[in-house]
Image (cartoon, helix red, strand yellow):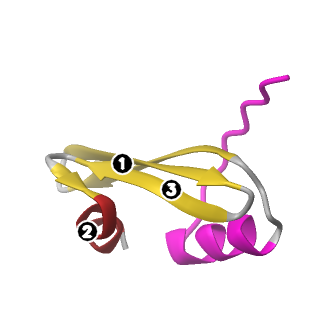
Amino acid sequence: MLRRVTTTVDSLARIIQTLSGGSMSGHLIARRENHMNLEEGEIIFAQGKIIAARAASRLGADALNWMR
């Protein structure tokens, strides 16, 4: 069953740590406003491990570093 949760946080790193530590699987979409621009990225987890990440034209580790 799909569950959608929307929350506002001040630390994406904290959310990633929580999802990884809880061995969770799912699709995280992160959004932030930056000087009137909306930036968006996504991270896919499988049993607590990041298996894919995308942000703008970046992929993988480059996308994760850009989102942090």
Q: Does dot 3 land on a helix, a strand or a loop?
A: strand
- The answer to the question of whether label 1 and label 3 lie on touching residues, with beta carbons closer than 8 A, is no
Residue to which mark 2 is pinned: 66
Residue 32 visible? The answer is no
Residue 3 visible? The answer is yes
Q: Does dot 2 land on a helix, a strand or a loop?
A: helix
Res 41 label: 1
- The answer to the question of whether label 2 and label 1 lie on touching residues, with beta carbons closer than 8 A, is yes
| Residue 51 location (% of width, % of height) | 51, 56
Residue type marked 3: Ile
Query: Camera-side residue: 39 or 36?
Result: 39
Quarter placement of the C terminus? bottom left
**Which quadrant would residue 63 be assigned to in this image?**
bottom left
Q: Residue at x 62, y 76 (%)?
A: 14
Residue to which mark 3 is pinned: 51
Quarter placement of the N terminus? top right
Res 20 label: none
Residue type marked 2: Trp
**Considering only vertical position in the picture, is 4 above or below 68?**
above
Q: Gap in Å between the C-alphas at discs 2 and 1?
A: 9 Å
Q: Which residues are magenta?
A: 1-21
| Residue 13 location (% of width, % of height) | 53, 76
Q: Is residue 2 magenta?
A: yes
